Image (cartoon, coloured by chain):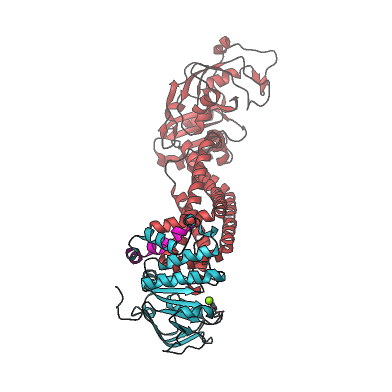
Amino acid sequence: MKILCFLALKSAWNRRSTLALMFLALTLSSVLLLALAHVRDAARTGFTGAVSGVDLVVGPRENPVSLVLYAIFHLGAARRNIAWESYEDIARRPEVAWSVPLALGDSHRGFPVLGTSADFFTHYRHGDRQPLRFAQGENLRGLFDAVIGAEVARALRYRHGERITLSHGDGRLPGLEHADKPFTVTGILAPTGAPVDRTVFVSLAAIEAIHLDWQGGRPMPGVTIPVDQVQKFDLKPKTLTAFLIGLKQRAAVFRLQREIDAQPGEALTAVPPGVALDELWQMLGAVDALLTGISWLTLGVCLAGAAAVTLAGQNERRREIAILRAAGAQRRHIAILLFLESGALALLSIASAFCLVRLAAFVLRAQAARWGLGPLSSGIPAAQWQLMAEMLGAMLCVTLSPLVRAYRQSLSDGLIPRL
Amino acid sequence: MDALSGAPAVEILGLVFRRRPGAPFCLNLARFSLAAGERLFLAGKSGSGKSTLLNLIGGAIAPERGAIRLLGEDITRFSSARRDRFRADHMGFIFQQFNLAPYLSAFENALLPCRFSPRRRARAQHPQREVERLFTALDLAPQCWKQQAATLSVGEQQRVAAARALLGRPEILLADEPTSALDAERQLAFLDTLLDEAGQARSALVFASHDRRLAERFHRILDIEHPQGDNPEDAGG
Ligand SMILES: Nc1ncnc2c1ncn2[C@@H]1O[C@H](COP(=O)(O)OP(=O)(O)O)[C@@H](O)[C@H]1O
Ligand SMILES: [Mg+2]
């Protein structure tokens, strides 16, 4: 119906400032709802994607969620370590296919440093069980080799062969530099969207080596062990932060978990990542519900505003309807005309909000990755489709109802425009 | 489905209309008919029900009882969608004011009936040229043609409305106080062109006005306050 589109456009253009404001209000309130949905989805994909090949995360006994957040996402404060022997005991068990030790605590220019074994790069999986790939160089070999994630390389403009030094702790205290023991970047990982992008990897032995002449978190006064001397010392690690386990058969996960939790000796806890995710979701559930409620409320307020504006313009619309009917428009033409405008307004608001959220997620992807959020999915998650359908329904109900009233009234008015 | 050529353009039988069930009669018309090409002056004070009768003939509201036959067909038996189509195909309207969609140009406003009704489009043959002809006949200055309706003077708006009502030679023309917003000199000139064009198109015209001075140019008068059934009084001249 060419004429109807023509009339709808002309009529809308005539009221463009009102419609533009309505569009803006609806778009912004839709952004809130969609951003929340996006963060929810991204957090889920980020979390599952960062631990996709891991069956158990084992660390000191504490809250399972914070253990996983620290060991995998490097979020939260440093904590008690576990003894190397505990790790060896469990790693030797027959049901364990592979295990990777993790030692956290140091940093490089704000990026966490992870002491681990070369096995990390063969066993770790990200996203949909993708293995790690080297964009440049290769795995850790020498004592002072370092492998860096894609985001580290990008942000600091590092290339293969770069010489770097590590800071003790999170690097915020001045003077706590391991400046005397520089590392060489021998490998750069391809981007993954997982926390490895933001990590500097070194060997566990290197972590031992740079702390030989340190004690209690500071350099030992008067003692320096130069680089060429460190090989004379025993560089076997004594403690570590946590370790990852892959099992030969996943069915054994919960049995092994129970055995680790119950075993005598050091107090350990083993966490299947899925369980941690569920717990995290439960913790965030109330906050999520609150934010969702507030966002719907905001949309409600905007819709009330839109309805008020539509109601205020109702007499004009009544007159317009009468004029068009007298000029030959049938009821269904009028209905289509009114629906076109409301529908276009709602659809455009939601589509723009969706694009804005995606654009923001793209622009802020580095920041989002720091918080453990996953990368943008290529498709649209089902939950977001459903949310958008609900928003569309709400908008149509509210913006159409005053128009339906105007339409009804104009039918009983007859054709003769009344004041 | 062209009308039976013999049937009157408008024929009303036993018409009763109330605003609400139980309300006092608003309109009560026993018998009345109008032939093709005939012009009727619908007289009555303001508030006497002239607009209501035009709405009934136009099929926009339904009577409580009675038949409204247009071109031989009783539109009270039509579905509302069919009434809408019938109106678009066979009727033109002019009102006292608010005739035009303010956001369309004069030309686009006048063309509207041909956009909604294929029959009107076919009867107009060349709708654009026909609008130009009507605009010229109604003495509408060409610089107004492309102007937004909202920026036209009242007199110009009424002429655009007349052109729109006449486009495609509808069998029935309904005019509700179309001259009341015009000043006295304009009124007669406007009325003469309207009657002239309606005559050429052989349209039956119902012209409602509270201003009896205009009545002498019509074939017949119907006083809505004292309807005389079958025999509306004859106009002078
Ligand atoms: N939509 C309406 N709702 C309620 N009352 C109406 C409506 N339209 C007209 N009326 C009433 O019906 C009566 C006749 O009105 P109308 O047909 O407009 O008279 P006229 O056109 O002769 O001035 C008046 O009393 C008017 O108040
Ligand atoms: Mg009236």
Chain B: what color? cyan
Residue A172: percent from left, percent from top? 66, 27
Q: Along the horizontal axis of the image, is A74 left or right of A393?
A: right
User: What's drawn in magenta, residue-wise?
Assistant: B103-122
Q: Position of residue B81 (x, y in %)?
A: 38, 71
At x 46%, y 30%, the residue is A191
User: Which chain is displayed in red in the rendered image?
Assistant: A
**Residue lying at 46% horizontally and 26% vertically, measured from the top left:** A189
Q: Residue furthest top?
A: A228
In the foreground, A314 or B205? B205
Q: Quadrant of ligand 1?
A: bottom right
Q: Position of residue A338 (x, y in %)?
A: 47, 61
Q: Quadrant of residue A134?
A: top left
Image height check: is B103 above or below A128?
Answer: below
Which picture quadrant has residue A3?
bottom left
Name, please, the residue furthest toward the right: A221
Quadrant of the drawing holding the N terminus of chain B: bottom left
Q: Nearer the viewer, residue A356 or B197?
A: B197
Residue B224 visible: yes
Q: Residue at x 45, y 67 (%)?
A: B162
Screen quadrant of the C terminus of chain B: bottom left
